[in-house]
Image: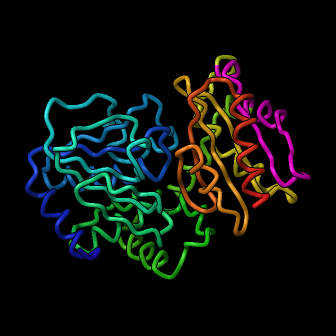
């Protein structure tokens, strides 16, 4: 079935559902949350019963300006007859097992989509799941309100690193042009996303930078967040996630790995320049992502041990 027919079939399932569970991935980023909220705002406006679910109790604080953010829950409803996964490339990224008998839709832009849903809407040419959801809205002639447009713009803008990634194309800017017709304030959105950093974050960032290690003649960099610093500064773990992009700004560095402990696991974010495909490195640990941005999780709370494993995987990738 082609993509257009999949989108139309998915929309039919949505309007015929009694209660929809919108699932966002664990260790949530801007794209998964804003994509989920884009759907939530539309569902609310159309009186469609639903809940946005995330397994984590810690959500990206910078997104609390988006409509319906406060409604996101880590508690499952007693009943739902349709699951809509957003930005969840595979079951592992969801963080919870659901009954396979329940009808489900997956909307994503990751190449590692494993077809675990009943209907899979995958467009790996897009730079964000938010952009795929925009196409879903347009194909089904769904109304995009100002609140929904703010969510979609946030996801597209953030996951494209302010329209600088290789997948940013003419269609991306056509989507943004259309979203601007709802009178969203892009200056306000940018300020909410990037200009509300806490003092605790700045105190923690300096500690993280002091952990900088270089490998492979400086081409590979690692940094980590010590769990003790979270208690010392009061920082939210997700607040410091952009450190990986800051380290990548170092001229000689081509690959960055950022380590932090979450729920007794070591979460690792990978970033790269040019044609270095860090999604292949993440795949060694059943992680996933894109060519220049990927993530993985290691079943250990020992950062140093995890670092040894990941650095070795990077070395192996480089040597081949």
Is 145 placed left or right of 264 in the picture? Answer: left
From the image, which quarter does the C terminus lie in? Answer: bottom right
Q: Residue 292 at what x, y percent from top left?
A: 64, 60
Q: Residue 249 at what x, y percent from top left?
A: 79, 56
Residue 109 to residue 135: above or below: above
Is 198 placed left or right of 7 in the picture? Answer: right
Say which residue appears at 15% left-offset and 29% top-offset.
78
Say which residue appears at 43% left-offset and 28% top-offset.
57
User: Magenta region: which residues?
Assistant: 203-230
Q: Nearer the viewer, residue 6 or 199?
A: 6
Q: Nearer the viewer, residue 214 or 148?
A: 214
Q: Quadrant of residue 91?
A: top left
> How did the renderer colour the structure?
rainbow
Is 127 placed left or right of 197 in the picture? Answer: left
Q: Residue 245 at what x, y percent from top left?
A: 70, 52
Say which residue appears at 56% left-offset and 64% top-offset.
160
**Residue 218 sits inside the magenta stretch:** yes
Say which residue appears at 47% left-offset and 31% top-offset.
58
Q: How many marks?
A: 0
Q: Residue furthest right?
A: 217
């Amino acid at each position: 079935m082609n993509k257009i027919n999949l989108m139309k079939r998915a929309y039919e399932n949505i309007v015929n559902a009694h209660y929809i569970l919108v699932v966002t991935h664990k260790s949530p980023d801007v794209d998964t949350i804003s994509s989920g909220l884009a759907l939530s705002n539309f569902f609310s406006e159309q009186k469609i019963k639903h809940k946005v679910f995330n397994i984590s109790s810690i959500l990206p604080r910078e997104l609390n300006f988006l409509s319906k953010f406060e409604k996101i829950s880590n508690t499952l409803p007693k009943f739902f007859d349709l699951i809509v996964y957003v930005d969840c490339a595979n079951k592992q990224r969801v963080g919870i097992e659901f009954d396979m008998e329940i009808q489900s839709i997956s909307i994503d832009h990751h190449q590692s989509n494993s077809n675990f849903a009943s209907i899979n809407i995958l467009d790996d040419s897009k730079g964000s799941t938010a952009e795929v959801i925009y196409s879903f809205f347009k194909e089904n002639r769904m109304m995009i309100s100002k609140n929904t447009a703010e969510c979609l713009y946030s996801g597209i803008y953030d996951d494209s690193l302010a329209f600088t990634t290789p997948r940013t194309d003419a269609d991306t800017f056509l989507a943004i042009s259309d979203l601007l017709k709802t009178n969203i304030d892009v200056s306000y959105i940018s300020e909410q996303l990037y200009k509300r950093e806490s003092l605790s974050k700045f105190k923690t960032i300096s500690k993280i930078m002091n952990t900088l290690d270089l490998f492979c003649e400086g081409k590979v960099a690692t940094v980590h967040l010590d769990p003790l610093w979270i208690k010392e500064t009061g920082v939210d773990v997700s607040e410091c996630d952009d450190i990986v992009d800051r380290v990548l700004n170092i001229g000689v560095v081509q690959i960055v790995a950022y380590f932090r402990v979450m729920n007794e696991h070591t979460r690792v974010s990978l970033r790269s320049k040019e044609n270095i495909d860090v999604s292949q490195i993440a795949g060694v640990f059943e992680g996933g992502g894109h060519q220049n941005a990927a993530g993985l999780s290691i079943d250990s709370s020992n950062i140093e041990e995890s670092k040894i494993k990941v650095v070795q995987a990077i070395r192996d990738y480089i040597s081949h």
